[in-house]
Amino acid sequence: MAEMTPAWATEKPTALLVLADGTVIEGRGLGATGSAVAEVCFNTALTGYQEILTDPSYAGQIVTFTFPHIGNIGTNGEDIEDLNPAARAGAVGAVFKADVTNPSNYRTAGHLDQWLKKRGIVALSGIDTRALTALIREKGMPNAVIAHAPDGVFDLDDLKRRAAAWSGLIGLDLAKEVTSGQSSVWRETPWVWNEGFGEQAEPSLHVVAIDYGVKRNILRLLAGLGAKVTVVPAKTDAEEILAMQPDGIFLSNGPGDPEATGGYAVPVIQDLLKTDIPVFGICLGHQMLALALGGKTAKMHQGHHGANHPVKDHTTGKVEIVSMNHGFAVDADSLPAGVEETHVSLFDGSNCGIALTGHPVFSVQHHPEASPGPQDSHYLFRRFVNLIRQKRGEELLVERA
């Protein structure tokens, strides 16, 4: 007679999230085996988990998804945001409430678990993500180790030691870890349902994008408005950029502490600003621009991560719902005279945009390209292109369709 499992037997945890204060959260492991040390944040988006996990801005972070069902539409080769998937730029860990089910979607090309394994992302499911989110809101984003061992054997003392010893994101330059290795030209245009991506074959303007961890859909939207986009590494100097004769310069999103990246990025941006070539920055690029103009940045308590954030554009008086992904913010009180605050978060009043008075230079903290999220802020790409067209004496595009 076969031996029966006792009714009171408990499932052995195969994954742990160990916080720096010693808190241990047990769950079921999936994705890559092993462990990773990082900062834990939460993301409130209802869709786009593949785009979120491949956003280079999440380097050095573990993403807790507040939406309970993640993975049910599977994965595919189109919904990725880092330029080089082999480099695995993006989140190092993920936390889910429900177990990942088999995918059910016409676009799926594989199971999320297998995709996580290929990306090297350590994941954990089966925990109360509401409780973890509440902890982050109360205490801030903790440093932690996420670990996955199929046999359920962990060296808990070592995991606690590593979590407590990690210095965190303050002072950490991660842009140099996720940037492009060399310059390249981007021509892919935005995705169209039932057609896929297009290609910009006849560009009418040239934008140089400084890659601090750029997302693909940013480049697609620029290409879709007629730009030949030359992507250059984060440490490219101003002389080399100007030698490419750009009509506009884009400062990309990216991970880490802006003041750390600013050590080499700010002097380059300051040199570029002297030329009066139109400049547009997003996320880390926004923070880099603020530093270059004399402002300051600071670490946020819980950060902004999600696709439902209300932001007001003071230049139009309109409110849009946007995607956010940042743990540092520009200190609006530090902005010098001549730098205007153009956008503000209606959640907490933090700065979300600036412009240099009298010059074709502006930036925003949020992600107007979405991916995932609403497209309310796509107009900002037309605003940038209009600065270029205005400088060339050309007819302006309608900013909002």
Image: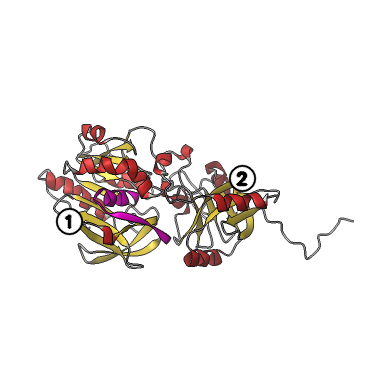
Residue 202 point in image, percent of width and height = 23, 37
- In magenta, the rendered stretch is 284-305
* The C terminus - image quarter: bottom left
Q: Quadrant of residue 10?
A: bottom right
- Closer-to-camera residue (142/85): 142
Question: Which quadrant holds residue 28?
Answer: bottom right
Left or right of 308 on screen, residue 380: left
Relative to 185, is 20 on the left or the right?
right
**Which residue is identified by label 1?**
338
Secondary element type, mark 1: loop
Q: Earlier in the sequence, mark 1 or mark 2?
A: 2
> Is residue 290 one of those drawn in magenta?
yes
* Residue type beneath disc 2: Gly
Q: Position of residue 70 (x, y in %)?
A: 53, 57
Residue furthest to the right: 1
Is residue 250 among what the camera can see?
Answer: yes
- Graded by Cα atoms within 10 Å as few (under 14), some (14 to 19) or many (20 or more), the crowding at tag 1 reads few
Q: Which mark, residue 34? A: 2
How many residues crowd mark 2 within 10 Å: few (<14), some (14–19), many (20+)? some
191 magenta-colored: no
